[in-house]
Image (cartoon, rainbow, N blue to C red):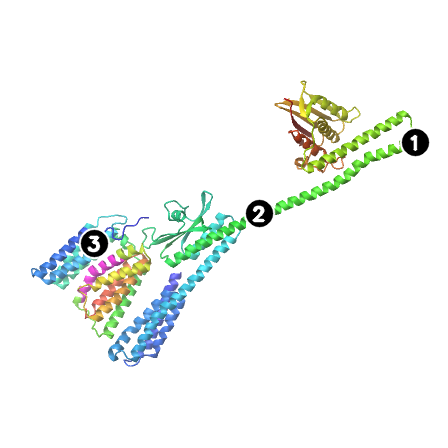
């Protein structure tokens, strides 16, 4: 059995274009020709879209093979439109939900099978993912409230943030760090090695995220919870063979995360 | 089933941790709850029951449960003695759980490895053909290792395979055989969960005799791979032991069979020699009695010249008979020493030799008729005349001895390419098939012949020895109730 290389299928051209767009946008913002919010919009589309594009590219290398460029461009555009709309009106965050719909369509067509998204729904695994998300999220809310005295809020902005997580943050993280990276690594190395690398890279992505609050307790909490979430989701994928339990766990956890007023 | 038990166990332990957390909720900002030490119970129980996973998860759960109140205390009163004590307690739990769990897991793995090696020895110790033994071993290993197992063992140029398929040059098993080193494939397909495969050669004294292939949907960690390589060596040694034991048993059986045959043969020989001694005493005593009796008569009484001549003729015949018996004994003794009988070769005409033997033994006073069927052209053989006479007289007298009255003994001679074939055929009772291969053995007499006719059991043995000394050969055919034919071939005079 011949396996693709670790980076086989990476859409280098598309990533280069995305990087160029991001750089150009940053320059224009720096020159004052574009508002700072434009950089935020482009960053969301480029980072999450780029991660999803890589995941699509890697998924397309295993049979049945398909051309990932079109679906990648579509999801980047969806994210860009949703991010742009949200800057004008938080209610436009609902456009983020077009992203999971598009992913569902791709999954039903069998193109995301290599990432662990397929027609069959693992009920037991999904319930376990729900329990994991509730446990971690509940613990985080408890710790935030009891230890640090943060308020728990459920206003409209929370819903907009949850929509952002459902359409961009959670899918890009799970499809890339678990579905693509961990999946590819575990076919070369042991589970422990694969989960360590995939979780470490995922952690790095959150630490460099400009949207993450810079408060020390938030950074430490993120380190702990995202590490635990990464390990649990990788185990759920290994155990159930499906990415869905991890998506459920992440979604529930990030929903709780968004309820912390400090975030 | 195991996974369900593990999940249920973890849930129970989680419940215990929460129960301890409820008990420990009486902690204040200034003082830690003494119940915090109760966290050790589910952590130790988790490690003992579920190994490293149980110990780690329970310890993590205990830490996560303590963390919110612990940080509140640190924030409220700083890192004082109480907070430090609680921090150390929590940290100890985090060390204790995984460490104890690791020890438990390793101990269980080690016990499992010993049990697996024992299972291999037990399976291969059973006496059964190799394919069945391999199949049984494959089933046992598959159950113990929770994996698909294939065993392939060389059988000359072929493979005896228990499991999927024989090793090929492009398969992992084939590469393991070619390189005499274990081959690990991290994933053999595109299933959701990776399928690990390990092929380890079965080696005996540096030679690869087979290959063990283990395929599992899930993890096959490095420690387990090393254990499987060691297990393959055990299997190779056990296979070799089983093979050697089987060979030893076969040798022992063969040896016992040979000893039994030799014992039987010695017993038969001993019996034959005893019979021979009795027979020889009788055979020697008969002419001696005649000689003693007639010599005493001649010495003590006066007879007419004709009567003296008759008695002298009888004494001469008995003397020749005595000499012939002694000649046979001497020749037999020589044969037993591995020496060929002394021959003085000459060109001997077969026709006259046969006629002389027939006339000597087949006189009109005989109850059986002797017919000579000899081709018209003169036939000659290169032979010792005296030996040839003994051969022919032995064969014809044998045939007459075992022929019923009023039957015919036929003596034939003909020349074939370079040889002269002489056969003596009677219409007697024949020889039993089981006795036929032994009729040329010294002292042997067919069981049904003993008591029917006198004989030493040396005649046919002497015939064979003499014929073979002439570079000829002799064989016997017989059918019960129809008769016996002895055929000999001697080299013809060119």
Q: Nearer the viewer, residue B357 or B54?
A: B357
Taking the view exactly as shown, the residue that stands out farthest to the top is B376
What is the secondary structure assignment of the residue under circle 2?
helix
**Rendered-image quadrant of the N terminus of chain B:** bottom left
Q: Mark 3 lies on which chain?
A: A
Residue under the point 33% across and 52% down: B187
Disc number for residue A99: none
Same chain for the residues under marks 2 and 1 in the image: yes
Q: Mark 1 lies on which chain?
A: B
What is the secondary structure assignment of the residue under circle 1?
loop
User: In the picture shown, does residue A170 fall above or below B29?
Assistant: above
Q: Mark 2 lies on which chain?
A: B
Q: Which of B253 and B208 is in front in this view?
A: B208
**Residue marked by disc 2:** B251
Residue A151 place in picture, x, y as percent = 20, 73
Residue A79 place in picture, x, y as percent = 17, 57
Q: Is residue A173 magenta?
A: yes
Crowdedness near tag 2: few (<14), some (14–19) or many (≥20) residues, C-alpha within 10 Å = few
Q: Can residue A12 be seen in this view?
A: yes
User: In the picture shown, does residue A216 fall above or below B491?
Assistant: below
Residue B181 place in picture, x, y as percent = 40, 51
**Residue marked by disc 1:** B301
Identify the magenta region: A158-178
Residue under the point 89% across and 26% down: B307
Q: Is residue A62 left or right of residue B218?
A: left
Disc number for residue A53: 3
Q: Nearer the viewer, residue B338 or A170?
A: B338
CA gap, disc 1 to disc 3? 143 Å
**Of marks 1 and 3, the one in the foreground:** 1
Crowdedness near tag 3: few (<14), some (14–19) or many (≥20) residues, C-alpha within 10 Å = many
Q: Is residue B324 left or right of residue B464?
A: right
């Amino acid at each position: 059995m011949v396996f693709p290389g670790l980076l086989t299928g990476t859409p280098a051209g598309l990533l280069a274009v995305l990087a160029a767009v991001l750089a150009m946008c940053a320059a224009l913002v720096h020159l004052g020709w574009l508002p700072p919010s434009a950089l935020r919009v482009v960053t969301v589309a480029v980072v999450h879209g780029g991660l999803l594009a890589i995941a699509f590219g890697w998924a397309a290398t295993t049979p049945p093979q398909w051309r990932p460029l079109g679906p990648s461009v579509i999801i980047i555009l969806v994210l860009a439109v949703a991010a742009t709309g949200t800057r004008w009106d938080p209610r436009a965050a609902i456009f983020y939900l077009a992203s999971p719909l598009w992913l569902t369509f791709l999954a039903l067509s069998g193109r995301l099978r290599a990432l662990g998204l397929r027609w069959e729904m693992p009920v037991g695994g999904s319930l376990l993912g729900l329990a994991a998300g509730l446990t971690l999220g509940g613990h985080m809310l408890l710790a935030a409230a009891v230890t640090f005295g943060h308020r728990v809020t459920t206003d409209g902005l929370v819903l907009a943030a949850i929509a952002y997580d459902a359409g961009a943050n959670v899918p890009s993280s799970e499809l890339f760090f678990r579905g693509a990276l961990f999946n590819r690594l575990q076919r070369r190395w042991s589970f422990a090695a694969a989960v360590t690398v995939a979780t470490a890279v995922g952690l790095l992505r959150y630490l460099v995220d400009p949207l993450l609050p810079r408060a020390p307790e938030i950074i430490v909490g993120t380190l702990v919870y995202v590490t635990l979430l990464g390990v649990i989701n990788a185990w759920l994928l290994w155990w159930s063979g499906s990415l869905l339990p991890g998506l459920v766990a992440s979604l529930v956890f990030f929903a709780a995360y968004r309820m912390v007023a400090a975030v | 089933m195991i996974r369900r038990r593990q999940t249920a166990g973890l849930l129970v332990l989680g419940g215990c941790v929460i129960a301890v957390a409820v008990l420990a909720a009486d902690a204040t900002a200034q003082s830690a709850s003494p119940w915090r030490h109760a966290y050790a119970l589910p952590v130790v129980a988790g490690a003992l029951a579920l190994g490293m996973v149980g110990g780690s998860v329970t310890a993590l759960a205990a830490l996560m449960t303590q963390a919110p109140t612990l940080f509140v205390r640190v924030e409220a009163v700083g890192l004082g003695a109480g907070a430090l004590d609680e921090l150390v307690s929590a940290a100890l739990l985090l060390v204790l759980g995984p460490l104890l769990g690791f020890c438990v897991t390793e101990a269980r793995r080690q016990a499992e490895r010993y049990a697996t090696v024992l299972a291999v020895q037990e399976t291969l110790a059973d006496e059964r053909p190799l394919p069945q033994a391999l199949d049984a071993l494959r089933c046992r290993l598959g159950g113990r290792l929770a994996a698909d197992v294939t065993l392939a063992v060389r059988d000359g140029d072929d493979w005896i395979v228990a499991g999927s398929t024989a090793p090929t040059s492009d398969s992992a098993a084939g590469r393991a055989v070619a390189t005499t080193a274990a081959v690990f494939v991290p994933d053999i397909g595109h299933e959701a969960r990776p399928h690990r495969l390990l092929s380890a050669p079965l080696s005996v004294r540096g030679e690869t005799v087979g290959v063990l292939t283990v395929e599992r949907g899930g993890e096959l960690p490095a420690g387990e791979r090393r254990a499987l390589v060691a297990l393959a060596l055990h299997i190779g040694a056990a296979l070799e032991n089983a093979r050697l034991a089987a060979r030893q048993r076969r040798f022992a059986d063969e040896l016992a069979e040979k000893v039994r045959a030799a014992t039987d043969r010695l017993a038969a020989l001993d019996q034959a020699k005893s019979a021979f001694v009795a027979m020889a005493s009788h055979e020697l005593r008969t002419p001696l009695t005649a000689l003693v009796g007639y010599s005493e008569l001649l010495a003590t009484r006066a007879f007419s010249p004709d009567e003296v001549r008759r008695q002298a003729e009888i004494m001469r015949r008995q003397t020749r008979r005595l000499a012939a018996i002694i000649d046979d004994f001497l020749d037999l003794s020589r044969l037993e020493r591995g020496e060929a009988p002394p021959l003085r070769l000459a060109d001997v005409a077969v026709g006259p030799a046969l006629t002389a033997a027939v006339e000597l033994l087949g006189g009109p006073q005989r109850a059986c008729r002797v017919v000579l069927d000899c081709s018209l052209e003169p036939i000659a053989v290169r032979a010792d005349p005296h030996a040839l006479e003994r051969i022919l007289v032995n064969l014809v007298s044998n045939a007459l001895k075992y022929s019923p009255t009023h039957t015919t003994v036929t003596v034939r001679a003909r020349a074939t390419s370079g040889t002269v074939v002489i056969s003596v055929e009677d219409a007697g009772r024949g020889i039993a098939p089981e006795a036929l291969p032994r009729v040329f053995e010294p002292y042997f007499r067919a069981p049904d012949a003993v008591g029917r006719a006198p004989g030493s059991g040396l005649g046919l043995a002497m015939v064979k020895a003499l014929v073979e000394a002439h570079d000829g050969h002799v064989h016997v055919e017989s059918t019960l109730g129809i008769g016996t034919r002895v055929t000999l071939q001697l080299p013809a005079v060119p």
